[in-house]
Image (spheres, rainbow, N blue to C red):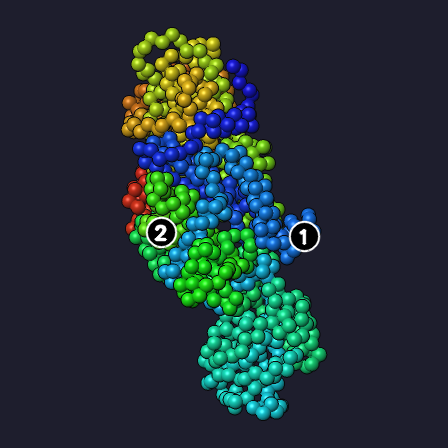
Amino acid sequence: MELSKNYIPAAAEDKWYQYWMEKQYFRSVPDERPPFTIVIPPPNVTGVLHMGHTLNETVQDILVRHARMSGFNACWVPGSDHASIATESKVVNMLKEEKGIEKSQLTRPEFLKYAYEWKEKYGGIIYHQIKKLGCSVDWDRVSFTMDDHYYQAVIRVFVDLYNKGLIYRGARMINWDPKAKTALSDEEVEYKEINGKLYHVKYAVVNAAGEATGEFITIATQRPETIMGDTAICVNPGDERYAHLKGHFAVVPLVNRKVPVIFDEYVDKEFGTGALKVTPAHDINDYNLGLKHHLEVVDTLNDDGTLSAAAIVFVGEDRFRARKKVVAALGEQGLLVKEQEYTTRLGYSQRNPDTVVEPRISTQWFVKMADMAQPALDAVVNGDVRIHPGDRFLATYKYWMENVKDWCISRQLWWGQQIPAWYDEAGQFVVAETQDDALKLYAEKFGKTVPSLRQDEDCLDTWFSSWLWPMEVFNGISQPNNADINYYYPTSVLVTGQDIIFFWVARMIMAGLEYKHEKPFSDVYFTGMVRDKLGRKMSKQLGNSPDLLELIERFGADAVRFGIMISSPAGNDLLFDDTSCEQGRNFNNKMWNALKLVKMWKPAADTGAPVPDFAVEWMENRLNEVHAEVEKLFKDFRLSEALKAIYSLIWDDFCSWYLEWIKPGYEQPIDAGVYEKTIGFFERLVQLLHPFMPFVTEELYHLLRDRQPGDDLVIRQFSTPAATHQAILAEGALAKEVITGIRDARNKNQVKPKDTIALHIETRHENAFQRIKSILAKQLNARELAYTRNAVPGAIALVVGKDKFYMLTDTLIDPAAQKEQLLKDLVYQQGFLKSVTAKLSNEKFVQNAKPEAVEAERRKLADCEARIQAIEESLKLL
């Protein structure tokens, strides 16, 4: 079979993914093997995978493939999230733009029909991308948070928590998204620092009889459009400026409402004018003051952010347009004292990033979080659930859990699980899974029967469904103690983004401990945020996020996986650039060319004799060394470092060194034993790399030799790496160092590679060179290789490590140029010596660094001093 010039990704990718699927290699059922379980963080069905998803799915696939090849029954559950706010917004916009239909024109079932059509379309796109990326998910286990069994589980949990007193309904100040027309939890509000204005407004003072006193109280507000909802002016009781106003009232501008002047220590006398307008319907602190002082609540905003009839003026105007009109009216009436530039933090909806959130009093459903949070906090603090990297995210997790607030879980939407609360005409309600259950419960609770009850119109927060994900993908809530949940739960690793540490990670731990009395996963691996090369977060708004399928078409899936993993240590943000994918493509071609080289060689007749070749022994030891290192890095979730170690092993050690060392002469056969060993090394190398780059490695594996049915890399089991012989590794490192040093010297002295040389080595350790002499002679084109105790006249002198080398050549040598080069080397070594000495002189470093790190620096110092001595001696000889 003739191999193409370069590796062609598309052909291999389509072929192998289909083959793996046909063989059902990704399918998992409980058996006698230990399980390794990952549940995919379900992407929203609102669009396509972005680069953050690409990183996340790649990390999961690496872990799953590695586990599958390490004796585990690997199960990776795919799925998607219904994303109530985001999806409903998309569907509403689609209906309006494409069909001219308003949501208000549809019944709930009609709207849900369109929503499910949207889900089928975009859910299919997401799953197609996951396949193109090479993800080895179990496609027989696809889950969706609105599946029938999942819906049932969510409702069951709601009823159970309500019956336990952990869910309640009440009027509270909540966050309101006027665009989506729904409540938000505190965690769904993102605060941004903006430049705004502070408006100073005069309120006329009147006495108890309503008579004007001629006085004014000036307040400062950022939101003049809420003035019409004011129900008090509050001052500090210790503020002498306002003590005489006890029993007086203020007149609210524009609407002429008489409101009391109240006194409360909440007001800071020193801030602004020391007087505060109180608008209980539109500020959480004002709301609390209103409760304390029994103030009226006047809600001046509609659910879409326009002014309500209660505002009296500018009714129906958008809140921000109304602000301008209020300011203008205040100015015309002489009540606007001044406008002042002001920097403040403003809350925006996470689901609609351009929408300012409104604080609003609303009757909603809440989960009491404090009691559930403590066990979930303990699970992480005591190490039952391990966070990676813990040094970065453990503190964040603890902060959230120690300052947890009740969770607003109701949303004024149709797309989602409908709240199982059932009301009579008077507003009395019961909570039950079905209407039949509700009717029976209603009769028991209220002592009467009714023909029907009205179900709550609201649906549940998306996170209220996804916190059950590790359990309900195995039907753990809807069918407790089934074989799958008992085998696969708790899952092994959760791979997710740091931005949902509380939204999802903490809540899953709470739910798992509540319903399975066990953690949902053992480890949490936080990926970093993917940024562009300018350091900006990738987003659709900036247009700086590449299209995944387009990247795969240009570079191949393996190259994209390589590109995003090579620069993504756990938890750290990574700068993604196309050049890293190019590096991945070059790596593919490097291995492809290595395959073509090896396949060109013709092995000699096999004598069956053992292979004494040093290159073979060295390569075997390097493989074992890196394999052991990679296994340790996997345990520590340092996947980027593992990929770098494998990359260097293949590109440098195998392709650049080993294959050159064993390459037979022109048209000469290669030793059969060496050839067989080389094929074996190549197989082990692609096996190590397979979890990271599955397609090219499977292709190479099958091209290396004919395979029996079922001998596929995707399921080939790793062997335990043998112990390494450090002496052989040291000799190999010496060979590389000497070859590099001599080649560099040849180049600097314009000695052509084809010109032969005589090489004399001055060393105290002749034994170190005995086994590598033939490699040195071959690689350096040396006609003679000998030892010496003295300088060799007329030779090019150089120092490599602690040894001196004298290179005799037929080319005339310029002593001045040689001296200049030695002096450059000396200056470099002296600078290096200075930096190492300074580090070892730093008491903090010596006391706080790990002992092995300090010892490594001391070895550097000794080696550097020896090199300086050797260079100085060579200079004397010149």
Q: Mark 2 Cα within 10 Å, few/some/many (few <14, many 20+)?
A: some
Specify the amino acid type for callout 1.
Ile
Residue 515: mark: 2
Q: Going 60% across and 50% down the picture, which residue do you hit?
A: 110
Q: Residue 114 placed where, x, y %?
A: 60, 47
In which quadrant of the rendered view does residue 619 lie?
A: top left
For the residue labelled by badge 2, is the local secondary structure a helix, a strand or a loop? helix
Q: Which residue is more in the foreground, 26 or 56?
A: 26
Mark 1 — residue?
A: 101
Q: Is residue 549 above or below residue 614?
A: below
The quadrant of the image that shows the C terminus is top left
In which quadrant of the rendered view does residue 717 lie?
A: top left
Residue 829: mark: none
Residue 264 visible, this angle: yes
Specify the amino acid type for callout 2.
Tyr
Q: Which residue is more in the foreground, 53 or 854?
A: 53
Residue 192 visible, this angle: no
First in sequence: mark 2 vs mark 1: 1
Q: Left of 135 or right of it: where is 855?
A: left
Q: Residue 294 placed where, x, y %?
A: 49, 79
Return the residue found at the far right.
332
In which quadrant of the rendered view does residue 867 lie?
A: top left
Q: Which residue is more in the foreground, 134 or 299?
A: 299
Q: Residue 64 placed where, x, y %?
A: 41, 36
Q: CA distance from mark 2 to mark 1?
A: 42 Å
Q: Going 38% across and 32% down the picture, which residue do you hit?
A: 68
Q: Mark 1 Cα within 10 Å, few/some/many (few <14, many 20+)?
A: some
For the residue labelled by badge 1, is the local secondary structure a helix, a strand or a loop? loop
Q: Going 47% across and 29% down the picture, which residue do you hit?
A: 21
Q: Going 55% across and 23% down the picture, which residue do you hit?
A: 6
Q: Residue 176 placed where, x, y %?
A: 55, 63
